[in-house]
Image (cartoon, rainbow, N blue to C red):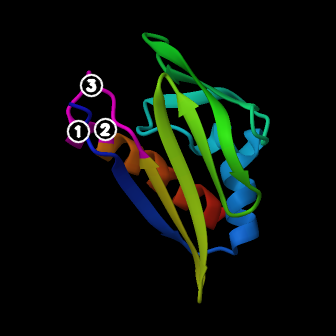
Amino acid sequence: MKAKPITVSAYINAEKSKVWEYYTSPEHIVNWNFADPSWHCPEAKNDLQIGGIYFARMEARDGSFGFDFEAVYTEMNPGTSFTYEFGGRICKVDLAATENGTQITVIFDPEDQNPIEMQEQGWQAILNNFKQFTERN
């Protein structure tokens, strides 16, 4: 049985256009796309169009482990939302302007190798890194 999608979100104290830029631009992605300080994202590429590829290299800073995350965009609403498919799973990212900033919501299909709670915590930690990076810069 397929598990229900997981939702993580964060309020970013920044305009929606900045949130979009920082979330989708490779030069910014490499600064926030990791769940823990012992990891990093040394490389990112992003072709923001339907059929375009999103690529991020994720590595432990000590070099002990790493993997490539690659996805294909299936929906694109520039500045507002996108959906991509990766490994038979789907992820949707939605940005909504609020009175004083932007709400970002990420809904993704879990994988079946790790506990749901661990996946939710990991993706939320990445989103929290994104929030901190975006609000600091």
Residue 51, percent across and down?
A: 75, 32
Crowding at dot 2, Cα within 10 Å, few <14 / some 14-19 / many 20+, comes out as: some
Asked if the residue at tag 2 contacts the one at tag 1, i.e. Cβ–Cβ closer than 8 Å, the answer is: yes
Q: Specify few, some or many for label 1: CA neighbours under 10 Å numbering under 14, 14-19, or 20 or more.
A: some
The segment highlighted magenta reads 108-119
Secondary structure beneath dot 2 equals helix
Q: Which residue is mark 1?
A: 116
Q: Residue at x 45, y 55 (%)?
A: 128
Left/right of residue 63 with respect to residue 45 in the rendered view = left
Q: What is the spatial separation of the Cα atoms under label 3 and label 2, in whole angstroms?
A: 10 Å
Q: Position of residue 115 (x, y in %)?
A: 20, 32
Residue most extreme to the top: 64
Give the mark nearer the N terminus: 3 vs 2.
3
Judging depth in this view, the residue of 125 and 71 nearest the camera is: 71
Q: Quadrant of the N terminus?
A: top left
Relative to 104, say whether 66 is above or below.
above
Marks 1/2: CA distance?
5 Å
Q: Quadrant of the C terminus?
A: bottom right
Amino acid under disc 1: Ile
Q: Is residue 95 above or below residue 90?
A: below
Q: Would you name the residue on which mark 3 appears?
A: 112
Instruction: Report which residue position mark 2 lands on.
Output: 119
Residue type pointed to by label 2: Gln
